[in-house]
Image (cartoon, rainbow, N blue to C red):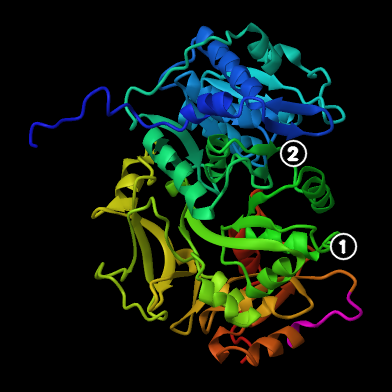
Amino acid sequence: MEDMKPCAANSPPLTPIGFLERAATVYGDCTSIVYGSNTVYTWRETNLRCLRVASSLSSIGIGRSDVVSVLSPNTPAMYELQFAVPMSGAILNNINTRLDARTVSVLLRHCGSKLLFVDVFSVDLAVKAISMMTTDPPILVFIADKEEEGGDADVADRTKFNYTYDDLIQRGDPGFKWIRPESEWDPVVLNYTSGTTSAPKGVVHCHRGIFVMSIDSLIDWTVPKNPVYLWTLPIFHANGWSYPWGIAAVGGTNVCLRKFDAPLIYRLIREHGVTHMCGAPVVLNMLSATQESQPLNRPVNILTAGAPPPAAVLLRAESIGFVISHGYGLTETAGLNVSCAWKPQWNRLPASDRARLKARQGVRTVGFTEIDVVDTESGLSVERNGETVGEIVMRGSSIMLGYLKDPIGTEKALKNGWFYTGDVGVIHSDGYLEIKDRSKDIIITGGENVSSVEVEAVLYTNPAVSEVAVVARPDAFWGETPCAFVSLKSGLSRRPTEEELIEYCRKKMPRYMVPKTVSFVDELPKTSTGKVMKFVLREIAKKMGMTRLSRM
């Protein structure tokens, strides 16, 4: 069989962009997008709109290797652009709408963006960012929003915009032959990691990787045909964990959502029969803590990731009727490549034990190759006892091609045949992975390693605590000590004191792990994807000053 070789008939490049073309054929009359009170499209209409936009991009000179950026929340245009931009042959770059103008400017310059789509409510941010650029600015395309008050208004400085989104749709050719990749290794998306600074990390993914992740995500979460998916997860965050393409593959309905609002989410769930949604653990906390959190008429599946969900939050959300699945992934993996695959026998366990098991990240998904936890010095696998910590490493088809214009960073992350995540974890005797912390979030106090996640999990069990984040505070004697930032639930008849929360921890954990400082805040600082910005809290903890002796 040595003469058997790949040929044009059996080796066309894998790409997720073709999912839309198929959806238009199979699910053409089914609803693809719902937004606001009046915006509804079918899959046939969505395909034609994307072809028109791709055609217009091509006609103004956008093509292969060009980077096209998007500054928008989860609107219909944002969803369509996940297909339309790659259909023109260009590379898609979604930008976090909550970044400051300086950072947006840095990203546009770093990736050499040729064109920037701008949502109506991000115009000021975009114009300010463009004014800071020292290189040629990108072509600007304005996106209106007729469903929002003021969203269809004329742009204050219309001269800065070359086109509108509607212009591109009207002038585009619906018969456009979208540009397929020459190789499945061709770049298709460029995403910047959370916490981007003046030294951005641009993660580049290829068509093959996104194709595999999109299909893998559907299989692992058991997403059926024609689901109703509510976009609580920002699409600009790792392309919404690759679900824009996945939902097209199964002909689902995308319920678009401009911003997170718990009462609105409950209304949309009821009105549209939502079956699936994604979000960070903070989403679970907000949905289960609001006054709207009444039992659901029927179960809603939520896939959560971004941080280990506290067991107390899981219990509260599931009591309402949300069916929680927990996974793990990074921007560098294009989505979730680890999931807490549930075993039927676990359903017979007490609720607290079920929540503890569900808080673990789990095992590799079926489309991924291998995951391990290794000793940082020897590089050898750690013992699978649930206690020995090491760095999480992985390899599989959805791992990034590398960091844009950063060969040193790429070489550091991709080495010895593995992707080194920078996350610290353990593997239990049953083979399930559990994250203990980001390597930078481990607190070293008096020579002992303290997992901030474990301390947070204990504080979440206190009935007065709404949110908590634990970081290291510099200490002259111990080097570092745990410092807890806590927001309390509203409507408490009595608010606990700092000493009471510290004493609460003393009863539930080893003495060295107990927070030596508790600072009360109204709300924890978060990114737009719901991740707590611990780097902000670390700076606050530093400013609290060094102490000679901490509480014992």
Please report whichever mark, 1 or 2, sits nearer to the chain's N-terminal start.
2
Tag 1–tag 2 contact (CB < 8 Å): no
The residue that mark 1 highlights is 291
Distance CA(mark 1)–CA(mark 2): 21 Å
Compared with 79, 219 (above or below) is: below
| Residue displayed at 54% across by 80% down | 476
Compared with 277, 312 (above or below) is: below
In the image, taking residue 241 as reference, residue 384 lies left or right, namely: left
**Magenta highlight on residue 22:** no
| Residue displayed at 43% across by 83% down | 447
Residue 233 point in image, percent of width and height: 64, 47
Mark drawn on residue 376: none
Report if residue 378 is visible in the image.
Answer: yes
Residue 494 point in image, percent of width and height: 89, 81
Q: Check the picture and name the quadrant holding the C terminus.
A: bottom right
In the image, taking residue 223 as reference, residue 285 lies left or right, namely: right
Q: Hey, what amino acid is under mark 2? A: Arg
| Residue displayed at 58% across by 42% down | 225
Q: Check the picture and name the quadrant holding the N terminus.
A: top left
The residue nearer to you, when weighing 15 against 390, is 15
Magenta range is 492-499
Q: Hey, what amino acid is under mark 1? A: Gln
The residue that mark 2 highlights is 258
Q: Residues within 10 Å of mark 2 (few under 14, many from 20)?
A: some
